[in-house]
């Protein structure tokens, strides 16, 4: 996830996950400039609706992000709840033809 984690980006993630054959996702907020409650709310509803067929976990880069995600009942990736600083070099790009930032645990991405 790059830029703002807002309602529009959350809705775009919903659509991508709906269209994906993958059943597990990790949404990495390390490069999100801001995180909005509405975005967490939008994804929390989707996660609840699809909890039987798809697993979604989040990587929070800050304690504030971790608190926001937890407040909406969203699962944090193991060990990531204590993260306080972004990781990585901030470079954008693709991995196996998919945008970085939204990857399944196996490393396969979700097409844009």
Image (spheres, rainbow, N blue to C red):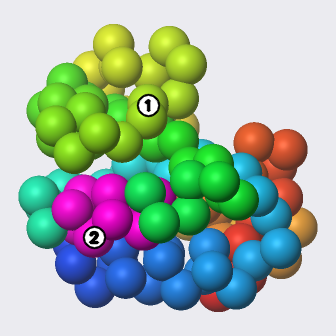
Q: Percent from the top left, x then y, of residue 15?
A: 53, 86
- The residue where tag 2 is placed is 42
The C terminus sits in image quarter: bottom right
Quick one: label 2, few (<14), some, or many (20+) residues within 10 Å? some
Foreground of the two, 20 or 95 = 20
Classified by dominant secondary structure, the portion drawn in magenta counts as: helix
For the point 44% across and 31% down, the residue is 76
Q: Are marks 2 and 1 in contact (CB under 8 Å)?
A: no
Foreground of the two, 93 or 19 = 19
Q: Specify whether 51 is left or right of 111.
A: left
For the point 63% across and 80% down, the residue is 18
Q: Specify whether 16 is left or right of 108.
A: left
Q: Quadrant of residue 95?
A: bottom right
Q: Earlier in the sequence, mark 2 or mark 1?
A: 2
Q: Percent from the top left, x then y, of residue 19?
A: 70, 85
Foreground of the two, 1 or 68 = 68
Q: Specify whether 7 is left or right of 18.
A: left
- The residue where tag 1 is placed is 76
Q: Which residues are magenta?
A: 39-47
Q: Specify whether 37 is left or right of 22.
A: left
Give the structural element (helix, strand or loop) at label 1. Answer: loop
């Amino acid at each position: 996830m790059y830029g703002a984690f807002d309602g529009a980006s959350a809705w775009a993630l919903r659509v991508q996950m709906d269209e994906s054959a993958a059943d597990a996702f990790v949404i990495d907020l390390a490069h999100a400039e801001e995180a909005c409650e509405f975005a967490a709310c939008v994804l929390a509803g989707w996660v609840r609706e699809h909890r039987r067929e798809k697993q979604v976990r989040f990587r929070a880069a800050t304690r504030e992000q971790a608190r926001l995600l937890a407040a909406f009942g969203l699962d944090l990736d193991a060990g990531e709840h204590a993260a306080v600083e972004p990781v990585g070099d901030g470079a954008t790009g693709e991995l196996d033809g998919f945008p970085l930032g939204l990857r399944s645990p196996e490393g396969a991405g979700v097409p844009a």
